[in-house]
Image: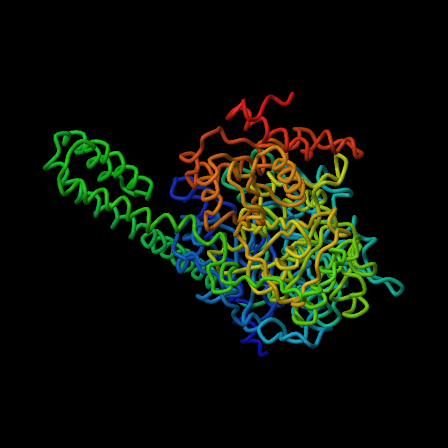
């Protein structure tokens, strides 16, 4: 590189830094004037992000922090107009490719999928996994993004064409210094050190976490000091830990080049502690940093502002002059102002058009309606709003409709149609794509029933799982499974017995006790084209990982407007185990916290195996809850192992009946089946239905068809009152309209409000028993016909 080329490169960096800072300054004003709702910006972090961008290559991935706007600009995936479109929550994915207005500014992503929801070639672009707000929550995913390179480098049978070039990709993470106090950070750091994966994590240290200084955040006030035990040496693998001043441009370039090289070539994880950064606008637009920083600190921040220090360095090294830089800065500020104006006009244009359409309809109403004075006021109030939002427009339309309720004329019908069409067009901008809409979503996978030989023998349920997993790993080289006790012993219930020896430790692997990063590994691996199955040993332990599941995996497809996917399968086991922390029945919480993830509750291992086969053909994430007490129960062994598929979203009628519909799932279903047999003995013919999957639930609306036949309904499970039974009841009664067919009040039967007590008696008195189900149904029929069904007790 010639000196002139060197100068050109540095000036390009300086331009990017100044543009980014000016965006932050103007962005804050846009929030304070009300055009944007909230702002959190990257001012003060510009130089290390420029250095990171120089070491970042095609195929690499970022899992970052909501202050990384300079980095995204430096890799040319983020523009001034995009910055402001994100602040304004522009719902056009072309204008705000980060989230189409679904996330506040500062949350960055790149598009991994094409318009059909299929993978693009990720090796030919620079990639950013979609950010989320919870602090340190990017860390679990980062582990999986880095581990994918290790998998691709060491497993040669996978078609890596779109995902990796010999595992040479680095996963780059960023985090604020205060957020390193989160448990997710330490869990992920430990996992990366154990796995030895190409991960570079940057800690942006500006001395504060919101308003709280480092002395209250971190032992020794330094995360690099805290983590010295992780430093690798001649005898132990570990991390390379580096420190660098955030205002020292040449040192930053050198540090990031070194970190990227050893991570990429040697697969060594690296932590870069970037010290002495500033945050000139404070934490966010919610407050001012003058409230908590001393005058001395504020003065130091002015002197050591990284852009100011770079400016001084450039002048002292004859790279530019004071006059040239001043002129450049003025032109860049104009450029940012022009970009802001363009972004605002683009945001307002469709809304102004929608307002004009409505105003014209209101003019017609005013001519015809007896309530024209009231409609005139609505018209005037809407017309004078200088910068309307969609809420202003549709709210006015709906209020106007009230004034013509009792009137009949063409303009009223036009208004009705306009409102209906408005919601049809606009609502999806805010509510679509929670789940995949591609040709690989779960509904495109056709059911394939299990097929049995005439003399099929019965085996333990675990054998069906083991043989089916064997078929999956033989058929899908990109499939792998990992978790606690998953590898060497073949999981605690032997559903993977012998498979590690057959397929190797990278595909059938053990992990430490770290549920959040087990899930994070799965998310990151899935983001890079692999098909991971992350095993959480028991359903109760999933609570450790709910934050990662809920905030990251469940929202991923939605928050990227369908531009990223992570078809992770979470395998766990639950139901009917005894004790407060081993009862495995917190379904009510999960179905609400994990919308965006399919939640499947197979009643036996054949159904579970079929779900895994279905999911391997789809591109959606799912949680599969196997019945903990079903591994040793006997089931017939299908002859089409690995090929049969359980449909997702469809219920199954286990027993036909005419007097009442009993709905359940999972392990409780066996109790319901037994109770139904016993009810027949006293003349009560119950229909028994297995919902099979809780999310999605009964997409063909077969439950209401049963209720229409029996005219009575009871929903049974072992969750707490108001949990999954209430969710199922709402589906049948309200959404499917089942109330109109009922001759008796609908009932639920659940576990007690508390977690189950320990022991078999604890289980019996904490969760529904066969006798509870029998008596609940019998008592309902006694109310219907006390003569035929005398009082039981």
Q: Nearer the viewer, residue 39 or 378?
A: 378
Look at the image and tell me whether residue 66 can be seen.
no
Q: How many marks?
A: 0
Q: Is residue 259 left or right of residue 687?
A: right
In this rendering, is residue 317 above or below 136?
A: below
Classify the position of the N terminus by image quarter.
bottom right
- Tell me where residue 736 appears, x and y as whole percent: 43, 41
Q: Nearer the viewer, residue 756 or 632?
A: 632
- Quadrant of res 375: top left
Q: Nearer the viewer, residue 221 or 64?
A: 64
Residue found farthest to the left: 367
At x 15%, y 38%, the residue is 365
- Quadrant of res 359: top left
At x 69%, y 56%, the residue is 534
Classify the position of the C terminus by image quarter.
top right
Q: How is the image coloured?
A: rainbow
- Tell me where residue 739 appears, x and y as whole percent: 43, 34
- Tell me where residue 385 appears, x and y as whole percent: 26, 39
- Tell me where residue 256 appears, x and y as whole percent: 67, 64
Q: Is residue 22 left or right of residue 152?
A: left
At x 77%, y 63%, the residue is 196
Residue found farthest to the right: 235
Look at the image and tell me whether residue 334 can be seen.
yes
Residue found farthest to the bottom: 2
Q: Is residue 595 left or right of residue 718?
A: left
Q: Is residue 261 left or right of residue 749?
A: right
């Amino acid at each position: 590189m010639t000196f002139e080329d060197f100068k050109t490169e540095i000036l390009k960096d300086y331009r990017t830094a100044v543009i980014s800072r000016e965006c932050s300054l103007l962005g804050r004003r846009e929030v304070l004037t009300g055009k944007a709702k909230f702002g959190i910006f990257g001012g003060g972090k510009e130089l290390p992000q420029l250095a990171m961008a120089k070491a970042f290559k095609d195929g690499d991935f970022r899992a970052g922090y909501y202050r990384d706007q300079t980095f995204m600009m430096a890799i040319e995936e983020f523009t001034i107009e995009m910055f402001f479109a994100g602040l304004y929550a522009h719902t056009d994915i072309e204008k705000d490719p980060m989230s189409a207005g679904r996330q506040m500014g500062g949350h960055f992503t790149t598009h991994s999928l094409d318009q059909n929801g299929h993978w693009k070639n990720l090796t030919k672009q620079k990639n950013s996994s979609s950010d989320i707000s919870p602090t340190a929550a990017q860390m679990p995913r980062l582990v999986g993004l880095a581990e994918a390179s290790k998998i691709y480098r060491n497993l040669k049978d996978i078609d890596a064409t779109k995902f990796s070039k010999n595992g040479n990709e680095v996963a780059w993470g960023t985090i604020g210094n205060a957020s390193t106090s989160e448990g997710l950070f330490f869990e992920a750091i430990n996992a990366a050190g154990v796995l030895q994966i190409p991960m570079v994590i940057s800690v942006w240290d500006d001395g504060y976490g919101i308003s709280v200084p480092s002395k209250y955040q971190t032992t020794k006030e330094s995360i690099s000091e805290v983590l010295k035990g992780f430093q690798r040496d001649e005898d132990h693998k570990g991390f390379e830990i580096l420190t660098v001043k955030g205002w020292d441009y040449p040192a930053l370039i050198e540090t990031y080049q070194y970190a990227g090289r050893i991570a990429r070539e040697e697969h060594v994880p690296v932590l870069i502690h970037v010290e002495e950064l500033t945050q000139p606008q404070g934490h966010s637009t919610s407050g001012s940093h003058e409230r908590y920083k001393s005058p001395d600190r504020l003065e130091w921040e002015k002197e050591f502002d990284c852009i100011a220090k770079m400016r001084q360095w450039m002048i002292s090294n004859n790279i530019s002059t004071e006059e040239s830089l001043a002129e450049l800065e003025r032109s860049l500020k104009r450029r940012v102002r022009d970009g802001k104006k363009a972004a605002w006009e683009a945001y307002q244009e469709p809304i102004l058009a929608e307002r004009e359409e409505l105003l014209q309809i209101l003019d017609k109403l005013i001519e015809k309606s007896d309530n024209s004075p009231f409609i005139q006021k609505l018209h005037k109030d809407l017309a004078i709003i200088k910068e309307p939002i969609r809420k202003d427009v549709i709210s006015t339309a709906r209020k106007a409709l009230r004034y013509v309720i009792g009137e009949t004329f063409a303009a009223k019908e036009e208004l009705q149609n306009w409102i209906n069409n408005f919601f049809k067009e606009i609502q999806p901008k805010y509510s679509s794509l929670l789940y995949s809409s591609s040709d690989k979503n779960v509904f495109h996978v056709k059911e394939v029933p299990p097929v049995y030989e005439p003399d099929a023998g019965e085996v333990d349920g675990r054998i069906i799982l083991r043989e089916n997993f064997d078929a999956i790993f033989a058929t899908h080289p990109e499939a792998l499974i990992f978790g606690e006790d998953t590898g060497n012993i073949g999981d605690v219930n032997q559903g993977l017995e012998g498979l590690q020896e057959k397929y190797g430790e990278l595909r059938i692997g053990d992990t430490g006790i770290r549920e959040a990063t087990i899930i994070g590994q799965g998310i990151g691996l899935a983001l890079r084209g692999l098909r991971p199955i992350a095993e959480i040993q028991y359903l109760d332990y999933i609570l450790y990982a709910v934050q990662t599941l809920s905030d990251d995996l469940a929202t991923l497809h939605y928050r990227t407007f369908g531009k990223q996917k992570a078809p992770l399968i979470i395998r766990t086991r639950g139901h009917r185990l005894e004790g407060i922390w081993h009862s495995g029945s917190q379904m009510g919480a999960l179905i609400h916290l994990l919308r965006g993830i399919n939640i499947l509750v197979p009643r036996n291992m054949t159904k579970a195996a079929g779900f895994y086969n279905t999911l391997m053909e789809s591109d959606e994430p799912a949680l599969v809850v196997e019945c903990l007490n079903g591994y040793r129960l006997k089931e017939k062994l299908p002859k089409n192992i690995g090929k049969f598929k359980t449909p997702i979203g469809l219920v199954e009628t286990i027993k036909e009946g005419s007097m009442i519909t009993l709905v359940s799932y999972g392990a409780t279903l066996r109790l319901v089946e037994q109770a139904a047999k016993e009810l027949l003995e006293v003349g009560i013919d119950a229909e028994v239905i297995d919902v099979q999957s809780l999310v999605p639930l009964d997409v063909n609306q077969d439950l209401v068809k049963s209720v229409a036949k029996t005219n009575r309904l009871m929903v049974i499970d072992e969750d707490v009152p108001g949990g999954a039974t209430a969710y199922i009841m709402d589906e049948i009664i309200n959404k499917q309209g089942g109330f109109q067919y009922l001759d008796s009040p609908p009932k639920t039967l659940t576990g007690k409000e508390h977690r189950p007590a320990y022991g078999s008696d604890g289980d019996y008195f904490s969760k529904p028993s066969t006798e509870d189900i029998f008596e609940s149904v019998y008592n309902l029929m006694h109310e219907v016909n006390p003569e035929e069904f005398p009082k039981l007790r």
